Image (spheres, helix red, strand yellow):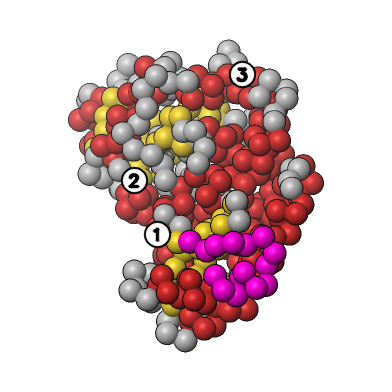
Amino acid sequence: MEKTEIIDLINKVLGEGSDIVSPLVGGMMNMSYIVKDKQGKKYVLYISTEQANEMVNRPLEKEHQRIVYSLGITSKNVYFDEEKGIKINEYIEGNSIDKVSSFDYKKVAKMFKTLHSSPVLSREDYAPFDRFENIYEKESFMYQSEINPLYEELRRYLFLHKDYLQRQRKTLCHNDAQRSNIVQTPEGDYYFIDFEFMGNNDPIYDIACFGNGLVSEGRNLLNEYCDGNPSNEEIKRFYLWRMYISLQWYNVAITKHYRGEGKKHGFNFLDVASHFLNNAKTACDGYEMEVHEDDEQRDTIKLIISTLDKIRHFLRKDGGDCEFVSFRDGVVYVKMIGACEGCSYAYSDIKELVEVILQEEVPGVVEVRLAE
């Protein structure tokens, strides 16, 4: 959007005599400017990137903005172009907390609790794994001739817990609650900004978002959010969601690099991708160090996965494949993919091939079923 177009827009919305004050350092999905009206009142103008507009439900975002404003933890929206993803909000005097040297974890945690206690939920769930596989990863894979081995390893580790994560209780969540989307005022108050990805989700997902820069920052916030005593399950979900978020942003960065958006927005997106892959590895290491799991269950799952790796070449002959989803109560749940997905022979492949071999090779497996 050219400068003259911006001036025309803010004069139309805020009144004649409005002007640009300064650009803001944008994120991966927006360009932002501080603007002011004739009386000097400040606002923030958000102009979304092409990729963001493809991913975001703008009418729903507008509803979410109103909900969060009613909770007293964001500023008022005064203009919203649902088609172009252009928004103008009243300016919150202060700095996003990725730009400050210190902040109050306790107050930040309180703001998260206010959001997660909202009596009004979204009309839609965030559905993170659907987004991951059908949007972020799908496009990223289109550009890559080879997939990074560390990415594949971490993805496999994460997807062991996909079913577990999807069963968690959902509240209204920000879903992009990184430090750059939280503003600290000079008075020490905190506010959320940017609601493009809001929807119902596991509240621990939001806490994990906070670790975009350093995983340890999200872990510190988890302590405050859980009043100093997070449970093993909360710690487990934190690290798993942190892995998910990092791998998600890895895919976004890869896509942006190959789309040529780095030159346009002044980012080296390959460096960004590398950061998030290392961030995911740090979260995985934290999981291994802190989370207490049933060793026998974990060893069984590892054996199931390695056995599937040995037999999947039979399915690949016809262009199909299967993916491990979960293991509980003796039942292995798998997802058929490629040519096997929706194939009339998929059930017989599961029962006559996958189930038979897993029962022979893995103690404790009694049945194999298609995951819902």
Q: Secondary structure at mark 2?
A: loop
Categorize mark 3 by other alpha carbons within 10 Å: few (<14), some (14-19), many (20+). some
In this rendering, position of residue 38 left or right of residue 175:
left
Categorize mark 1 by other alpha carbons within 10 Å: few (<14), some (14-19), many (20+). few
Res. 56 mark: 2
- Give yes or no for contact between labels 2 and 3 (Cβ–Cβ under 8 Å): no
Q: Which segment did they paint magenta?
A: 355-369
Task: Between residue 120 and residue 352, name the one nearer to us.
Answer: 352
Q: CA distance from mark 1 to mark 2?
A: 14 Å
Which of labels 1 and 3 is toward the front?
A: 1
Q: Amino acid at mark 2?
A: Val
- Give yes or no for contact between labels 1 and 3 (Cβ–Cβ under 8 Å): no
- The quarter of the displayed image where residue 21 is located: top left
Question: Residue 78: within the magenta?
Answer: no
- At 39% from the left edge and 30% from the top edge, which residue is drawn? 44
Q: Earlier in the sequence, mark 1 or mark 3?
A: 3
Res. 107 mark: 3
Q: Secondary structure at mark 1?
A: helix
Task: Between residue 203 and residue 78, name the one nearer to us.
Answer: 203
Q: Amino acid at mark 1?
A: Asn
The residue indicated by pointer 1 is: 134
The C terminus: image quadrant: bottom left
- At 36% from the left edge and 22% from the top edge, which residue is drawn? 120
Q: CA distance from mark 1 to mark 3?
A: 36 Å
Whether 293 is drawn above or below 160: the answer is above
- The quarter of the displayed image where residue 142 is located: bottom left
